[in-house]
Amino acid sequence: MPLDPTTAERRALITGATAGIGAAFSRRLAADGWQLVLVARDAARLTEMAGELGATYGRDVETIPADLSTDDGCAVVEQRLTDGSPVHLLVNNAGISLNTTFLRSTAEDEARLLRLNVHAVMRLTLAALRPMTERRNGAVINVSSVAGFGATMPGSTYPASKAWVTNFSESVGLSARPFGVRVMALCPGYTRTEFHQRAGINMSKTPEWLWLRAENVVDEALRDLGKGKMVSVPAWKYKVVVAGMRHAPRRLLQAVARDARGRIGRDEH
């Protein structure tokens, strides 16, 4: 068991910690007795979250304001993972999507998406795994997405970035497991967070039954981590979706994508 419940001072570092799934991880782990290191771009929101967790749960909370789409931001968090007091759980939650198709995008926006969704995940995972494997204790949860299992968002490069996160986590997890360290990709579906609003994506037509609560996503993620799973897909409905995306004929997925592209085109005009 990489996360020994008898450890006196378990510490988790969470990126994108002030909203959505990151905030849900912060509150759940604080309630479970973890010490926390919270990372986000907005220093004021970090201070507010730290105050809330300290007052509610009596937790010691470190904060690191950092933009992980930059080299400097990644370097600050890397140093905390390698040189500071031990981190037993890393949650790579920070990520973005773009409210535009690739043909209308810019190289600068696409590069920022890759730096945050891919590059930062790689760098922080590597920084965390070195001390974890030396201690033979620890875990990494990389927040991916159901979208990464198929190209069903026409023109969006977000699914491609999340496909990388899932495959990266599985591959690295195989090499880390002999050292008593677990790496798991968390692949939720639509979750009630600020994610789509921040990206300017209109989700008003998404059926209510498809939405998940961030707290439930976190609960299932931690259960699956305890079971040793390398990929966690919360909620039975999305397990069915992923099974279909993995095994359905490619022509069927392409037909679904073409239909979705038509709907997107009509919505934009």
Image (cartoon, helix red, strand yellow):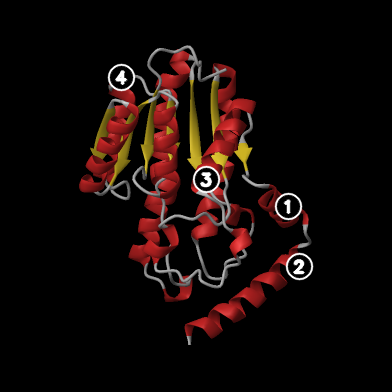
Q: Which residue is the site of mark 2?
A: 252
Helix, strand or loop for disc 4: loop
Q: Is residue 79 visible?
A: no
Confirm or deny contact between disc 2 and disc 3 (CB under 8 A): no
Q: Separation of disc 1 and disc 3 at Cα?
A: 21 Å
- Pick the quarter of the image with the N terminus: top right
Work out whether 161 lies above or below 132. below
Q: Which of the two discs, 2 and 1, labels the residue nearer the N terminus?
A: 1
| C-alpha separation, residue under disc 2 versus residue under disc 4 | 50 Å
Q: Between residues 189 and 170, which one lies in front from this camera angle?
A: 189
Q: Residues within 10 Å of mark 2 (few under 14, many from 20)?
A: few
Residue at figure coordinates x 33%, y 32% from the top left: 56
How far is disc 2 from disc 1 in space, using C-alphas?
Answer: 16 Å
Q: What label sits on residue 85 in the rendered view?
A: 4
Residue at image location 48% in from the left, 12% down from the top: 6
Question: Which of the two marks, 2 or 4, is nearer to us in this view?
Answer: 4
Badge 4 vs badge 1, beta-carbon distance below 8 Å = no
Q: Amino acid at mark 1?
A: Val
Q: Give the amino acid at mark 4.
A: Ser
Label 4 and label 3: CA atoms lie apart by 27 Å
